[in-house]
Structures are given as C-alpha cells and as structure tokens.
Amino acid sequence: MRHLETLRFVDVIARAGSIRKAADTLAITSTALNRRLLALEDELGVPIFERLPRGVRLTAAGELLIDHIRTQISDLERVRSQIAQLAGERRGHVAIACSQALLPFFLPQQISRYRAQNPGVTFSVNLRDREAAEAALIDHSVDLALVLEPVRVADIYTLYKVPQPISAVMSVDHPLAAKPKIRLHDCVPYPIALPNIRYGVRYLLEAAQMRVSYRLLPAVESDSFEFLRNYAAVEHVITFQVPIGLPDAQSDYSVPFCHRPVDGRDLPAASLYLAQLKGRVLPVAAARFAEQMMREFARRFAV
Amino acid sequence: MRHLETLRFVDVIARAGSIRKAADTLAITSTALNRRLLALEDELGVPIFERLPRGVRLTAAGELLIDHIRTQISDLERVRSQIAQLAGERRGHVAIACSQALLPFFLPQQISRYRAQNPGVTFSVNLRDREAAEAALIDHSVDLALVLEPVRVADIYTLYKVPQPISAVMSVDHPLAAKPKIRLHDCVPYPIALPNIRYGVRYLLEAAQMRVSYRLLPAVESDSFEFLRNYAAVEHVITFQVPIGLPDAQSDYSVPFCHRPVDGRDLPAASLYLAQLKGRVLPVAAARFAEQMMREFARRFAV
DNA sequence: TGCCTGTGCTGCAATTTCTGCATCGGATAG
DNA sequence: CTATCCGATGCAGAAATTGCAGCACAGGCA
C-alpha cells in the first residue's frame, strides 16, 4: 500500500537499528530513506529517532509512533482481507507463534484441514517460547499465539484455554509403562530428562516440587522436545510433556515410546492458551482459523 | 499529515458525494483528485465508489475502507497529541456535539474553565440532536457527545450519566410560580409550549402521558430551547426544560422567567449522557476535558 | 596518536510522479 | 431534444523523489 510506505520504512529502521541497514533490506539507497525519515520528523515536529554513532534508536515520541504504525499496518491488512472476502476471494495469511508441543501433530493437522477448505490461505508458523510469543503479538509480527502457561502480559487477550494434564514419556519397555497412571515419586529411582526452565512443563514441575520432599534431578536437559522424546525412546529415562504434542492412540504413528498421565494430585494440569493482541480485530483468515481451533479444542477436551 | 492525504481526500469525496464537489472544497482540480482515487482503487483491486450519473456513492468495500480511514485519521491525531504532550506542549483540539441544554451555561463555563488552564487547546461546539450526535461520534467528526436521552446505538460508550429532573419554566408572575414543585395536571389549565418530538424532554413528556388521562397539548412548538424560554417569559405559557440549561439561583443572571421542578411521580428524570465512540482512545485534550466535566457532574449532582 | 570503519547528512542532476488544461463520452432532468 | 453535470483521459509542464558522490563525526583498534 503506497500511502504508508514511509511508515513501513520507519518500522524497518526501528527493527534494523540503522538507516543504512534498513535501506539495504528495503533495496533502496540510504539517501532516499534518510530523506523520508527527515521529512516525516519535520512534519511531526519531533525527532523519531535519536542519532547514535552506531545507528539510531527510537525516542519516546518514536515509541508512540511505532506503535501506531504497526497498528495501522495490520489494521489495513485486516480491511484488505475483509474486502477480499467481500469480493468472494478466499485468500489471506495467518501468522502463528507457538510452543514446541504444537509442532508435531496439532498444527500440521489443523493447518492442513483449514487449507483443504481454503487453499488460498497461506500460513507462517514460528516457534517461540511463551515470552517471545507475546512479544510477537505485541509487535504485530504474528496474529495468533498458542502457548503453554504464558507470562500473561496485560496486552494479551485469551481466546481459549485448554487444560493439558502433563504426561510422563518413556520407552515402551520401561518398568513404569505398565502403570496406567504415574505418581511423581514413582519416577525418583529413574534418570530424568527435562526441558529447561523457560518452558511451561518444567516450570510446573519445579513449582510442584516446592511442596514435596523428593527431587527430580534431570540427568539431561534440552530445549528440544523432539530430542527429549527420542532420547526417552532409546534409554530408560523419563521425560514430561503435554498430550497435545504426543501421538494419540488413534493415530497411525508407530513410535518406540509411550506416555502415561501424571496423577493430578502431584502435578496440576498445564494450560494451553490461544491468544491474540488485545483490542485488535483479526484479519478474516486468522479469525476463522482461530475459530476452527477453538471448535477442535472444545471437541477434544470437552469439559 | 502527508501520507494519508489521499485517504483524507477519499473521506471528503464520500462526504461530498461527487469528485468535482470534493475537489472544489479541497482546492485542487477534479483531475488530480480523480486520478488519486483511480490509483487507490487500482492498488486495492476493487472500486471504492460506484459511479452514478450525478456523482459517486460508496461501494460495500468503500464502506469498509472509509471506516478504516476515519479511524486512522483520528488515531493519528491522538498520537500527535500524545507526542505534543510528551514535548510539554499543552495544545490540542476538542470537538463536541451537544444538546441545546448545554449551550447557555454549562459548556461555556466548562470550556472557559478548561481554557483558563490550557490556553493552547481549541474547541468546536456543534449543536446536534441525539441521533446526529451519535452519528458524529461514529464518523469521527466529534470526540465527545453530551446529549439527553440518546438513542443508544451499539457503537457508543457512555462515560458518565447524570439524572436531570425536568423543570417547568414560566414567567415570574405566572400563577404556578408560587408553588415550589409542580404536578403535571396543575399545568392543564394553561397554554403549553414544547420542543418537538426529536428532543429528549418532549419524548419523556409524551411517554409520561401514556399513563394518565389528561393531555398537555402544545400551543406552540419549536426546535429552539432559547425561543421557548423567552416565549414563556412574555406570555403566561409553560414549557419544560432540564435544569442544566437554566440559570441557577447562585448565578447573576437576571431573567424574567423562573423554573420549578416537576414532581418525580409524574415525570421520570431525564438522563444526560457524556459519551464517546466505543473502542476509541481519545486525544489527550478531549480525555482531560471529559474528566473535568465528569468531576463537575459528580460535584453538582452527587448521588 | 593515527588510521579505519561505519554512521547520518547534503548538493546536484536525472528521473519519476503528480497536477492542470482541454476535451470526450455518457446519463439524466426539463 | 437539449442543457447540464458527471467521471475519465491525452498531453505538457510542474513538483517531488531518487541516486551518486562526498562531507563531518564518532568510536574501535593498533
């Protein structure tokens, strides 16, 4: 959209941290970009960036403005998508930030299902920890976030909340695999593999252990849920994940690990949140996709 | 602001109903304006206006866009005012739509008081009936509305609500002026002057008469509250108004008419609403002025 | 200290975009 | 049927934007 080209450029400068770098990514000369910025600051009567020897940084006024710019850009996007829908087109784009647990099964299935009915809609799926996911909502780089136990900043609006009782994951021939339900102290004799503290599952585990005498000390730590699952498959180690990231009984996945729910008395269920930026009206495609996921949540995890 | 000049032009076209008229008010040629419009429609991929023999009219897509445009324009205005405030300037503009009752005393006093502390802030005060006031909020032509018994459309947000018991207004030597409180049936023997049905006071009077046997038939109807007051001053006629539009005892106005409250059993109190557009963040000056008025309401009409 | 690198900024010419005049084609009101 | 008002368009001049080259400045490094 031509009329907010300059504003978009300002956004790029803010993200790049220097006019020349921004000009480079925008494939124009720094001269032109610089002059646009100067003209805008002149119009506004206030500098948007403070000039540092190694680049530029937003002033207080700039912070205000950049927020406005990002809102305007995505609001225009929404209007365009509404107009496109009016014209009968079924196009659009949905940008999602999500936790690792959504990557193996849930999102692939959901996106595939949605695209089967709306082939014109494209998706971008970005792995973000819960903090980064919320930041991505705030700076308008994603439309939806799907995260476990978010930090819950004020600017985030929760569309749906799903309880996710934590499961213990182990190889199929692990001694504990015989039990239908796992107590946490059952795990003490065995080596443990855990995600690190930035992740919701680990956070809940640590919180739960504040109240008990035993300790689950990780033999292996990782930031990859996929690694942890596969590690549990090849060694008699126990790890913990949420069910939405694990193959369920009906699926035709054949894997050398299994999972058993942890007793609710030992560990409260985690919560999976579907969230958007507060006060933002989503583009049509994103809103529809969110609705589809919410229906699926309601179906699977009916209360 | 340069970058949304074209969008502002589109807004003017929409209001003017024809490109040439809009070009005229914008002091440019119709050619230039027409081409900007065509370029924008080309960018958007859909026509914004349908071309009629006597001008243009918004298409469905255009309705969507014009709403976005008006939001963007006033949102930018808000950002500018926030930036100005950041820079220590105390400037800005407040546009108000209000009922007649606010014109003689309340708004002049309030604006004068506000401007005494904020001389840089300018005001526009527009007389609008309750329906037009809400329309003005919606199309962003005013920031605040102050109206009696509004129609209460969904997009309006009420900031404050003040009860206004209706008063009978008459000349000082009117027989009823001896009573401290007026019953409606006391008025039957006398000629009545009323505002027409579009106004809140008349609306309430008509509603009240649904339940009783007597009728107050207006000898004179007018759409000017000022006329009605002054007419009551020169003839033994009774009219009805809300107290906020009448001089109070402490004021140093010397007028040949007086007012007495109507008994609450006969006529419910009207409600004066201070309202803004739902979901809109007001510019600093408008928000501050609204706060001042709300404090004044709380002081005068403490519950 | 002196060199080097990276930054934002500016004068000037080429280029792109925009504007205004004159005019066309079409639809309606009288 | 005619007069009028409307939006659209070809073309030439005006205005804004861009890119090149170069400047001044501030830190990093030897």
Image: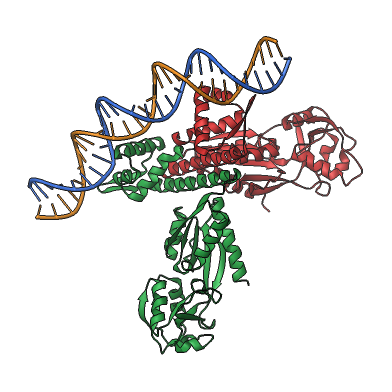
Chain colours: A green, B red, C blue, D orange
- How many numbered discs, if any? 0
Residue B257, by quadrant, is top right
Q: Position of residue A4 (x, y in %)?
A: 44, 40
Q: Quadrant of the C terminus of chain B?
A: bottom right
Rendered view: A137 above or below B49? below
In the rendered structure, the answer to whether residue A19 lies left or right of residue A182 reads left
What residue sits 53% from the left and 34% below the top? B41
Q: Nearer the viewer, residue A247 or A299?
A: A247
Q: Position of residue B146 (x, y in %)?
A: 65, 41
Q: Quadrant of the N terminus of chain B?
A: top left
Q: Position of residue B138 (x, y in %)?
A: 62, 41
Q: Nearer the viewer, residue C27 or D23?
A: C27
Q: Is residue A57 visible in the rendered structure shown here? A: yes
Residue furthest to the right: B213
What residue sits 49% from the left and 39% below the top? B118
Rendered view: C5 above or below A215? above
